[in-house]
């Protein structure tokens, strides 16, 4: 059996695949407690769910970016920094903050950005303007 992958529009596939994806999402979100329940709610058999569940995965046009910033060690700076990210509809995945040295802490933030996210460049410019942000850059 081959492990090759292909990106295919869901509309080109038999309906069962879309229903399996929906069932998987229901399980992940807690909308269904068991695979049997998810299958029934999606209108497929339990055996169809198990047959295809490990072969089909949802794809969304989102990607992860990483920001490295140096923030002054003052109360509320990191909170305000994260608030600006939220206003640009980016999803914070991780935040790592080092111990402040010379009253400045290195912070690395991983974000998921997608079609709802406003301009990443505008977000970085807005973060750069915050009081307490010493420097900021997007890293790879």
Image (spheres, rainbow, N blue to C red):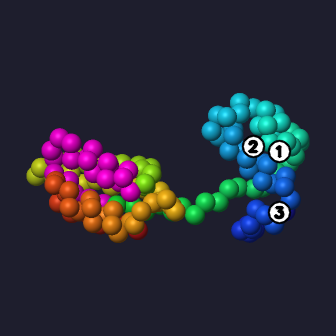
Relative to 30, say whether 137 is above or below: below
Residue 56 percent location from the top left of the image: 75, 56
- Left/right placement of residue 5 relative to residue 124 reads right
Query: Which residue is at 36% across, 52% downward?
Result: 87
Q: Is residue 44 above or below residue 12?
A: above
Q: Answer whether labels 2 and 1 touch (C-beta < 8 Å).
A: yes
- Nearer to us of marks 2 and 1 is 2
Q: What's the CA distance linking mark 3 and mark 1?
A: 15 Å
In percent of the image, x 20 and y 61: which residue is there? Answer: 129
Residue 90 numbered mark, or none: none
Q: Which residue is mark 1?
A: 49
Residue 127 placed where, x, y %?
A: 26, 59
Q: Residues within 10 Å of mark 2 (few under 14, many from 20)?
A: many
Q: Which of the numbered marks, if any, corresponds to residue 23? A: 2
Residue at x-position 43% and y-position 55%: 90
Which residue is painted at 45% across and 60% down in the image? 117
Looking at marks 2 and 3 on the same chain, the residue that comes earlier in the sequence is marked by 3
Q: Which residue is mark 3?
A: 13
Q: Seen in the image, is 43 located left or right of residue 33?
A: right
Asked if residue 124 can be seen in this view, the reply is yes
Residue extent of the magenta highlight: 68-88
In the rendered structure, are the residues bearing label 3 and label 1 in contact, judged by CB atoms less than 8 Å apart? no
Q: Is residue 137 left or right of residue 103?
A: right
Which quarter of the rendering shows the N terminus? bottom right
């Amino acid at each position: 059996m081959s492990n090759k992958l292909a990106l295919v529009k869901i509309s080109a596939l038999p309906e069962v695949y879309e229903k399996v994806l929906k069932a998987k999402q229901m399980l992940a979100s807690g909308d269904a407690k068991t695979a049997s329940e998810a299958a029934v709610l999606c209108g497929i058999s339990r055996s169809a769910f198990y047959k295809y569940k490990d072969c089909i995965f949802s794809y969304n046009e989102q990607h992860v970016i990483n920001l490295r910033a140096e923030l002054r060690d003052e109360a509320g700076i990191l909170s305000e920094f994260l608030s600006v990210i939220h206003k640009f509809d980016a999803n914070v995945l991780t935040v790592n903050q080092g111990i402040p040295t010379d009253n400045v802490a290195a912070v690395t933030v991983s974000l998921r950005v997608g079609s709802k996210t406003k301009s990443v460049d505008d977000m970085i410019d807005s973060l750069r303007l915050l009081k307490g942000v010493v420097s900021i850059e997007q890293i790879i």
